[in-house]
Amino acid sequence: MSDRIRILATSDLHGMIYPYSYADKLFRFHGLARINNMIRLLRDENTILLDNGDTLEGSPLSFYHYMFQTDDINPMTDVMREMHYDYINVGNHDFSYGEEALMMHLQNVGAPCITANWRFHGEKYGPTYVIKEVAGKRIAIFALVTQYIPHWERRENIRHCKFQDAYETAEKTVALLKSLEKPDYIVCLYHGGFERDLQFGYLTEEDTGENEGYRMLKNIQGIDVLISGHQHRSLSGKLFNTCYTQTAQDGREIACIDIYPDTDTIEPRIFKVDTEPDTRVMAFVQDEEDKCQEWLDQTLGTTNVDLKVTDEFDARLHKSQMVTFLNMVQMETTKADISGTALFNGATGFDQNITMRNLVSTYTFPNTLVVKKVTGKILKEYLEKNAEYWTLKNGSIAVNKSYESPTPMHFNYDMIDGIEYTVQVSNPLGSRIIEMKYNGEPVTEDQEFTLVINNYRASGSGGFDMIRNAPTVKTDLTNIVELLAKYIMEHQTIDFTPVHNINIIK
C-alpha cells in the first residue's frame, strides 16, 4: 500500500557488528553488518529507523575499543552513522564506560537522542517528544530508559546523570501530546521490559520499577506502539489496544511495525536477521576489528587445572573450577575472607593456553569489585537467595524455571568460595542451607566476614537486598577482566588444588 508507514527498530545491539562469534570465530546470524542489508530490503521513503539503546557495551570489539582506542569514535558509532538512523534512545549499558564515552557516541552517531527521562548536568538531555510527518500523518515519538540504572551502575559513570520515573514520564508525555499536538499515532521507545506475563498478567520478577512495560500497556491510554527492550526477549503482539515489540540481543532480530492509516490497523512483527552481511559496513571498521582479533589471540598464560566449561548446568551444579578460579582472584585481589561470583550465560571457560578470547568469552561484563562486611546471619540470607536457583523436577535437581524464562538469568546465581555449605533442594525456600562452615567450624549468626562480589551484585540487583544493605568496606574500580588478565600474566601458570566446597543435595 502506498500510504503504509513503516517503523524499523533495533535494540540491545551490544557492540555487535560482525556476523560471527568472538568465542569460536564461527558465523552467526547477528550483528549490524547483517542488519544493514535487511534494513535496505525493508526501508522505503515512508520508513522511520529507530534504535532503543544498549549499543556500546557487550562485545569484545567494544571492550577492546574502550581499553585501547578510547580517544577514537566507537566502531558502532561509525556504522550507525552510515545507516542513517532517525532517532535513538540510550540503554542502561550505554553508561557502562562512563559519561565521556557516551557523549562521544551521541555527538557523532548522526541521529538525535530523544531519551526524555534522563537529565544530564541538570538538564533534560533529550526532548520531551518529537513529531515526524510520514505519508501525510503526524507520528509522535518519545523515548524512555529504565530509571533503575543507579542501582547497577558505578557512581563515577553517571556522576552528572539523573533518571526520572519512566512510567510517570510516559503518562505525562502522552497527556501532553493528546492536549497539544493531537498526533495521528504515538510511539514510545522504552529501554525497559515487561514485569508481568503478557498473557495472564502475573508478576514474572520482583516489581522494582526496573521494567514497567506491562503497567504502561495497561494503564496509559493513547500509546499506539510500545517498542521495548532490555530483557532480550523476542516479542510482538497487541495488548490493551497497544501494539508492542521486543527483540533479542546482539542484532539477531529487527522489529518491523507497519501502520496502515486507511484501515487504522497496526501490524507488529519480529524478523530474524538472516540476510548476508554487508561487506562494505565491515570494511568500514575493519582496521580496529583486525587489531581486536590479534589482541584476542594473545596467550596470557597456561593452566594445569581444567577450567573449560562444556556443560553450564553441570558447571553450576558441581561448581566448575572456573568459578573457583574467579573467586580465588577476587579474594587475592581484595584480601576478602570469602568471594561470590556467577557463571555468566554462555561462558566458555579457559583453554590450556589461556587467551584474551577466553577471558572476554567467559567474563562478559565490565564489572568491578566491591567488598562488603557481612555477618553470619546475612551470609546465610545470601546463600538462601542463591539456593532458590534450584528445584526438583521428576525427582531430579533442576534449574528453577524463573531463572530460565521469560528471560535467562543464570547470572543471578552466585557460587561462594571461602566457606563450605550444603543446599538441600527439597527443603522450603529460606530453609535450604543446612550446613555452613568457615575453616571447618560452623558459622555463627554474629560472626563477621568480608565478602567480595561484583558491583552489580553489590547494588542488590537480582533480589539481593541483604547485600546492598551491608556496609561497604572498599571498592576496586579496575575492570575484572583486566584483573584476571593481570593475574594470569603475573603467575604464567595457573595451578591449584580443585575446591569442592558446595554440596547440593535433593
Image (spheres, rainbow, N blue to C red):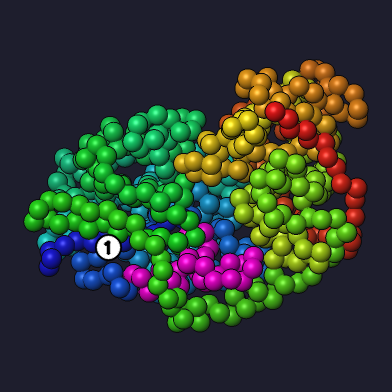
Residue 29 shows in the view? yes
Vertical order, 76 against 481 (above or below): below
The outermost residue toward the left is 262
Q: Say if 167 sits above or below 48 in the image.
A: above
Name the secondary structure under disc 1: strand
Q: Where is residue 380 in the image (x, y as percent from the top left)?
A: 73, 24
- Between 44 and 65, the residue placed more toward the observer is 44
Question: Position of 82 compared to 443: left or right?
Answer: left
Residue for point 16% across, 62% down: 4
Residue 392 spot, x, y in % from top left: 61, 30
At a point 19% along the width and 56% down the height, the residue shown is 259
Residue at screen point 58% across, 71% down: 26
Amino acid type indicated by mark 1: Ile
The stretch of residues the image draws in magenta is: 13-39
In the image, is residue 466 part of the stretch drawn in magenta? no
Magenta stretch: dominant SS?
loop
Label 1, on which residue? 48
Q: In which quarter of the image is residue 42?
A: bottom left
